[in-house]
Image: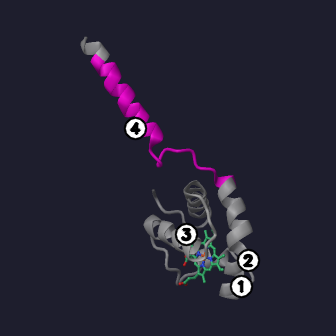
Amino acid sequence: MKMIFIRLVSLGVLSILMSSPVLAALDLANGKTIDQQKCYACHAKKTGFSNGDMIYTRSDGKVKSLADLKKMVGLCNTELRLDLFPEDEADVVAYLNQQFYKFKP
Ligand code: HEC
């Protein structure tokens, strides 16, 4: 009886972990494609550097943490009505962090 109880509990914990967005598989390649298709050109134009990556590495950037990064990506997404799905937004955040910002999760 006790064993069954423990099994059920660990199954429950497992399914909570599996459905948590933190552990959901992030698709960095998808994030990169989205950045190139939807974000790069405007950032290149706005910064005047003709390089859309430089907005992520500028020294006076506004993004100082992973939370800031999520906020900015969300802001650009909703303000500009880019219509990214939440999963896509998470992929872009993961890609930008891995490629440029390198914040610890
Ligand atoms: C139509 C123009 C435009 C598009 C499209 C756009 N952005 Fe932006 N983005 C901006 C501007 C302008 C800023 C600078 C805002 C500021 O300095 O206050 C910015 C800043 C950012 C920053 C902060 C950079 C830093 O370190 O300071 C991030 C991150 C970002 N954008 C992500 C994205 C992502 C991801 C997408 C595509 C899904 C996207 N943006 C699409 C205009 C755009």
Q: Is 49 placed above or below 11 here?
A: below
> At numbered mark 4, what does the secondary structure look like: helix, strand or loop?
helix
Residue 16 disc label: 4
Measured as percent of width and height from the top left, residue 67 is found at 44, 66
Q: Amino acid at mark 2?
A: Ala
Q: Can you give x and y, in whole percent of width and height, for residue 81 in the image? A: 61, 72
The picture quadrant where one finds residue 12 is: top left
Q: Which residue is mark 2?
A: 41
* The disc label shown at residue 45, or none: 1
Ligand 1 within 8 Å of disc 2? The answer is yes
Farthest residue to the bottom: give it. 48
What is the CA distance from the residue labelled 2 to the residue labelled 3?
A: 15 Å
- How crowded is the residue under tag 2: few (<14 C-alpha within 10 Å), some, or many (20+)? some
Q: Amino acid at mark 1?
A: Lys
Residue designated by label 3: 73
Chain part drawn in magenta: 5-29
Mark 1 vs 2: CB contact within 8 A: yes
4 vs 1, front mark: 4
> What is the CA distance from the residue labelled 3 to the residue labelled 4?
26 Å
Would you say residue 24 sits in the magenta stretch?
yes
Answer with mark 2 or mark 3, whichever residue precedes in sequence.
2
Residue at 66 percent of width and 86 percent of height: 47
Position of residue 8 measured from the top left corner of the image (x, y, whole percent): 34, 22
The image position of residue 79, as x and y in percent, is 56, 77
Q: Is residue 76 magenta?
A: no
Left or right of residue 66: residue 42: right
**Sequence order check, earlier mark of 4 and 1:** 4
The residue sitting at 61% across, 57% down in the picture is 88
Of the numbered discs 3 and 4, the one sitting upstream in the chain is 4
Instruction: Determine the secondary structure under disc 3.
Output: helix
